[in-house]
Image: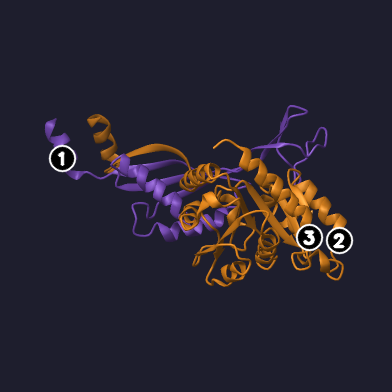
Amino acid sequence: MAEITSKQAANDSAFTQTVAVNEGILSKNDLFAARNRARFKSSRLLVLNVVSSPGSGKTALIERTLTDLRGRLRGAVIVGDLATDNDAQRIARSGAPAVQITTGDMCHLEAEMVGKAANQLNLDDLDLLIIENVGNLVCPSGYDLGEDLRVVLLAATEGEDKPLKYPVMFKTANVVIVNKMDIAEAAGFDRATALENIRRIAPQATVFEVSARTGLGMEAWYAFLERCANERRQTDR
Amino acid sequence: MQNALEIAVEHAKRQNATRIHRIHMRVGALSSVVPEALAFAFDVVTQGTPAEGARLEIERVPARCFCPACQLEFEPDGLFYECPQCGSLNVEIRAGRELELAFLEVSRQEPDDRQQTTDNR
């Protein structure tokens, strides 16, 4: 050791060495996500991570879903917002418990924040936990929150090429919901091309076409949630 | 980048290193990370840390898919990950999601110890 030290010292005045690390940058988040997942599973809870661009209708979709599912599924929401609690207030109108996470300047939710927010909910009394992520189709894609299903929402008004612009996010989706279908025609939305783009980018995803405002297509989405929540309830703790 | 720096500093400490000279990262094509943004953030977050002035190396990892039907591994061409042989979209993503700190180059400045080593000879 001393030999190496003095040799190195001669030309560099310091001992330089290479250290193998091979560690994922988000490994800390993955650890918290695994912890959340185990906890959610032991409460037999179906957990959704809802992501979209700003203004696609995440809050409207969640508000309507929880209002319409009252008496069918016991739901709660964890909502991430950059600065306000407007979304949490809107969701609270559905009667479901809502916990707000103000992310400040952060563009995505992380598993540790979600775990802390979940402490404020009685998970054993719930069937469905919806996490509303920050409006952003890029950064949240790398952050597992411990969810069962990643739900990617896009509005018909955003255009049929949205899945092509954010392929990474769409490739991680379990569910893709096309919202604002009530005004799709007026917005010049090319439905066939959009569905084809989604199918090719995200062949693994279950697709729903809805309007959270009018309720169009929402029943199929509810039936899907009920089915998934039932499967969850039957799993071993 | 903050996360990467924390991991780097932690590993450097374990080696009793006082300076980090080089950080080598692997960034997959599907990681949603722009290397230029990473490099910019690196200069900002390393200020005043043992990694200040360190060289950041970013190794890009291309996406790789596997078609179970054809038993074929391929590098997807474009946005749609179709098997080039059978056209199936039912493929596994095998590489491209990496966002890793691969290795570091660190050093230890211990003038007193070195002095002793020399004296012993």
- Numbered tag placed on residue A210 in the rendering: 3
Camera sees residue B79: no
Residue depicted at 66% across the width and 41% down the height:
A231
Residue depicted at 62% across the width and 63% down the height:
A135
**Other-residue count near label 2 (Cα within 10 Å), few / some / many at <14 / 14–19 / ≥20:** some
Q: Secondary structure at mark 1?
A: helix
Chain A drawn colour: orange
Asked if badges 2 and 1 are on one and the same chain, I answer: no
Q: CA distance from mark 2 to mark 1?
A: 76 Å
Amino acid type of the residue that numbered disc 1 sits on in the rendered structure: Gln
Name, please, the residue furthest toward the top.
B71
Please state if B30 lies on the left or on the right of B1 as rendered: right
- Numbered tag placed on residue B115 in the rendering: 1
Q: Secondary structure at mark 3?
A: loop
State which mark lies toward you, 1 or 3: 3
Residue depicted at 39% across the width and 54% down the height:
B53
Name, please, the residue furthest toward the left.
B119
Do callouts 2 and 1 mark residues in contact (Cβ within 8 Å)? Answer: no
Asked if badges 2 and 3 are on one and the same chain, I answer: yes
Question: Which subunit holds the residue at mark 3?
Answer: A
- Numbered tag placed on residue B60 in the rendering: none
Quadrant placement of the C terminus of chain A? top right
State which mark lies toward you, 2 or 1: 2
Q: Mark 2 sits on what residue?
A: A190
Please state if B76 lies on the left or on the right of A91 as rendered: right
Chain represented in purple: B
Amino acid type of the residue that numbered disc 2 sits on in the rendered structure: Asp
Nearer the N terminus, badge 2 or badge 3? Answer: 2
Quadrant placement of the N terminus of chain A? top left
Identify the image quadrant of residue A9. Answer: top left
